[in-house]
Image: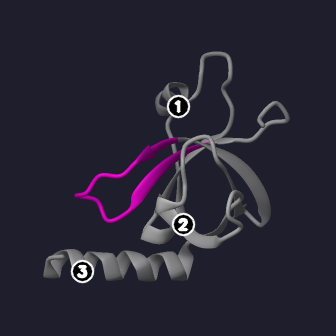
Amino acid sequence: MSELRDILYSGMSFRMIASGDTCQNLSTGTFFQAEMQEVSEIEQEAMVAVGEIREAMRMHVVDDAASNALREQQFVKIFYDGVWQTYRIVSRRNNPASIATTFGLIYKTDGDT
């Protein structure tokens, strides 16, 4: 990695440790830190099928081992706003120019398996 990328990676990693949310990959049971980001209504509609609008967010993961183990349609638990909540991964964006892998999440309902 370049020196600038190393500096950015270190800063983002520290931010994840200091203020990230604790998450668990429900397929492997492993825990990792991630940063959550709200999505706009337009993005939310694009993330889920029409008629299936529910809570959606983006999850940014810096830890390569954790992000490599996550796939679309898997479930993750996130300790968010003081409670554990389960979400389904609906998209994965791993841009080599970005420090973090970004996942699109929607809230798990009873109909999800």
Cα distance, mark 1 to mark 2?
19 Å
Q: Position of residue 44 (x, y in %)?
A: 54, 32
Left or right of 5 in this view: 79:
right
Q: Among all residues in the image, which is located at the extreme top?
A: 50
Decide: is 31 above or below 80: below
Left or right of 43 in this view: 81:
right
Q: Which residues are magenta?
A: 91-105
Secondary structure under tag 2 reads strand
Residue beneath disc 1? 47
Q: Amino acid at mark 1?
A: Met
Cα distance, mark 3 to mark 2?
19 Å
Q: Position of residue 100 (x, y in %)?
A: 38, 62
Q: Amino acid at mark 2?
A: Ala
Left or right of 66 in this view: 87:
right
Q: How many marks overall?
A: 3
Residue beneath disc 2? 34
Q: Are marks 1 and 3 in contact (CB under 8 Å)?
A: no
Residue beneath disc 3? 6
Question: Is disc 3 surrounded by few (<14), some (14 to 19) or many (20+) residues within 10 Å?
Answer: few
- Please tell me which of labels 3 and 2 falls first in the chain: 3
